Image: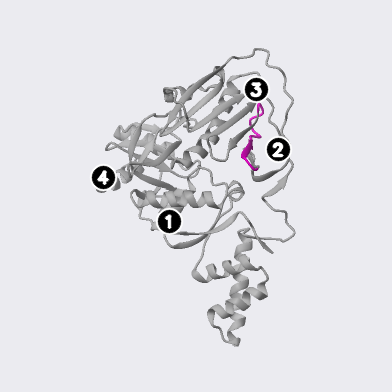
Amino acid sequence: MKINPVFSLYRIARIPYLLPHGQGIADHKRGIRLNESGVFLWEQLCRHTDPAWVLEQFGAYCQAAPDELPLLERDLHSFLRQLADYDILTDPLASDLNGTSSAHFHTSFCPDPKPHPSTSQCIKIGPVHLRLTGPKEAFASDLMPFRCADIDRPDLAICIKAAGLSAPQQETVLIQSQTLRLSKTDGEYAMRFPQMPQIVGATLSIDGTRACIYYQPPITKTLSADLFHAVRFLFLYTAKKHGCYALHSASILYHKQAWLFSGPSGMGKSTHAALWNEHFHTPILNGDLNLLAFKDGVPVLYGLPWCGTSGIADTGCYPLGGIVLLNRGATDECLTLTEDRKILLSAHRLISPAWDGAMLQQSLDFMAALAAQTRICLLKCTKNRSAAETLKKWVDLQDY
């Protein structure tokens, strides 16, 4: 028995939780809420996973009499079973999710039949400046509304190259999923995208200021689209270092404020935004993804070029009105959430990197600060107009 390294203890509004990060998020692991006895047992397990030793410490913690030890032992075994059910405790013979191995990047390419001259383009998304250098044909048209004048020192410089990716001697694998293989060496992150066959990989400096994307020619519409999404992975890392976090959500503009609708895929966030647009004539800002930050101490939404299949994106900056977390229901009802649930459920919808425990803590801290100044509710709803009407009544009752 050993602790799964993709779980860590966090306190959200003073409530303790064991939550996954990195590979745990990629594998859709679930977290659990603990009481203070659970926190004590977790801290002992972090020191030693021998159940007999943990039971001895538990007995001393509870100041238990000898005849009370069998009850404590049952409680301990129940706690260990629960951790095992959530894969927080694993078989000691199981391999680590995070491990060190040799890197294996592809390095052979077909020559580009039509070489493209290199050019540079500066992009500004929210407060973050990017400079893209590479073939102009590789730049997605979705980025063009965010063009800006060049600056001497962009926050992130991305070079797009038709070249091989030099393999480091060793790499520590952080995440491996169907869409991303992320590893770390001494000086940078390395990414590979299994579902993007023409993109060999990408490298990103630890400080988030320099990156390269390596592709296999020729440049096609499919490759340009894949490069657009690869840039997103790099941008989100640098944006987080600048205090900007991306929430998977659709957004509308109401009372000159941005309101976000968020929920698991298929929950109806785009449907709900469309209901507001149709019945209340509210503009849709983005159909899939929104960048949140603080500007002069006030929560704001910045437009993003990435908008899923909606095709709806905006380049502006708007005060944040609130976040509505969607859940299906037989009727329509706005529910108040406790502070820890506001933070936790909203943080679940962030797609900003949480590649390790420290990154997840940063996301939780950001959402805690945001929740302190932002209206967040849970809307149990249908897909009918009544859902938008119910939420509008709740929004109109809020103080502005």
Which contiguous range is marked in magenta?
A: 186-199
- The amino acid type found where label 2 is placed reads Pro
Quarter holding residue 228:
top right
Circle 4 is placed at which residue position? 396
- The amino acid type found where label 4 is placed reads Asp
Where is residue 261? Give x, y as percent.
40, 42
Circle 1 is placed at which residue position? 341
Sequence order check, earlier mark of 4 and 1: 1
Asked if one can make out residue 378 in the rendered structure from this viewpoint, the answer is: no
- The amino acid type found where label 1 is placed reads Arg
Circle 2 is placed at which residue position? 168
Quarter holding residue 87:
bottom right
Pointer 3 and pointer 4: residues touching (CB < 8 Å)? no
Pointer 2 and pointer 4: residues touching (CB < 8 Å)? no
Name the secondary structure under disc 3. Answer: loop
Q: Nearer the viewer, mark 1 or mark 3?
A: 3
Q: Nearer the viewer, mark 3 or mark 4?
A: 3
Name the secondary structure under disc 2. Answer: loop
Pointer 1 and pointer 3: residues touching (CB < 8 Å)? no
In the shown orientation, is residue 38 left or right of residue 247? Answer: right
User: Separation of disc 3 and disc 4 at Cα?
Assistant: 53 Å
Quarter holding residue 272:
top left
